[in-house]
Amino acid sequence: MHRLVASDRGARYPYAEVHAFVQQVAQYEGVAPAQIVLGVGSGELLETLGVHCGLKGGEALYAAPGYLQLPRAFEAMGGRARAVPLNARLEHDLPAMAAQVGAGTSVVYVANPHNPTGTVVDPAALRAFVADVAGRTTLLVDEAYLEIVDDAARRSVVDLVRDDRRLIVARTFSKIHGLAGLRIGYFVTPAPLAAELRRYSVGGVSAPAVAAAAASLADEAFVKATRARIMAERARVTAVLRELGRTYAEPQGNFVFFHAGRPQAEIAARMQAEGVAVARAFPPLLDWVRITVGLPDENTRAIAALRRVLA
Ligand SMILES: Cc1ncc(COP(=O)(O)O)c(C=O)c1O
């Protein structure tokens, strides 16, 4: 049914669908529709925020190694993006980040779980960080992989969004919902900040993306089953890494970041020769590799390749 809706409606602008979808998302998040900003993937919104804040100048703080869409857009607009190294557990170093927030800080970016490490931060420490930092500057907490973590309800900070804080929570349909190719995501933020950000948004979501996202958001059983499948496949990857004596960051997403002990470029080339693509290098951790959990038979091939390449 949803396939029909999407293809039938492709000839028209999806105003009515978008309106209904924003209501659905707001209800799901327990916020007002005016607090939702839709984007062509959450990536478009990260760039929108990077542009918006970058135009004001100053600094963006982000964790390194990390996901660069926001810092890069911020720098393209003339701001300076400052990387704060992850701690020894490859988690965000929240005390170090908070200590660097000053009058010149335009935006702070925390991904929880993080990409590329898959690690999460302590929930109580994150809540204290939000209360502190989002009162002083704009704080983006990117929860792209939240639904995959062990205890999502305890780890989300969406309930901390309120009018006296410049807190933004980012979500996407690209991960647990499996809709990366359709491109749709959203921000939850106070209504005035949402209105500000909409002015800078350059995209517009498509009717098929809205139809698919609406169906998936309403399908709790699908989301639960997908999570179980990701966990089972991820466990196969971590088991082989343990067997091969490799250490890895505590994974809470749909990928594993492991210590290869050899340059990422070498591992990537050898895996590519086996028909398996791994993620790009994440400086400064150049002998670590991120591998994404695939479908069961893709994973079987990836695991066999890992055995040969890491042996
Ligand atoms: C942490 C994080 N945020 C945001 C995104 C962007 O995802 P999308 O634009 O598909 O919503 C990604 C994609 O890999 C990601 O890893």
Image: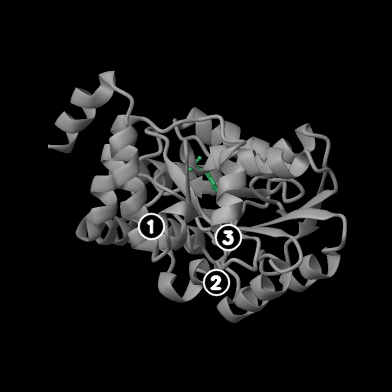
Q: Residue under circle 3?
A: 246
As drawn, the label of residue 26 is: 1
Which label's residue is closer to the chain start, 3 or 1?
Answer: 1
* 167, above or below 280, in the image: below
Q: Position of residue 74 (x, y in %)?
A: 74, 40
**Label 1 environment density (alpha carbons within 10 Å; few <14, some 14–19, many ≥20):** some
Q: Position of residue 182 (x, y in %)?
A: 37, 33
In screen coordinates, is 127 left or right of 8? Answer: right
- Residue 295 showing in the rendered view: no
Q: Residue under circle 2?
A: 160
The reply to whether callout 3 and callout 2 are in contact (CB within 8 Å) is no
In screen coordinates, is 123 left or right of 179? Answer: right
Q: Secondary structure at mark 3?
A: loop
Q: Amino acid at mark 1?
A: Ala
Q: Position of residue 94 (x, y in %)?
A: 72, 70
Q: Amino acid at mark 3?
A: Arg
Which label's residue is closer to the chain start, 3 or 2?
Answer: 2
| Residue sitting farthest toward the left | 1
Which label's residue is closer to the chain start, 1 or 2?
Answer: 1
| Residue sitting farthest toward the top | 11
Tell me which corner region of the image, top left, top right, bottom left or bottom right, holds residue 141: bottom right
* 33, above or below 159, in the image: above
Between the C-alphas of marks 1 and 2, the distance is: 15 Å
Between the C-alphas of marks 3 and 1, the distance is: 43 Å
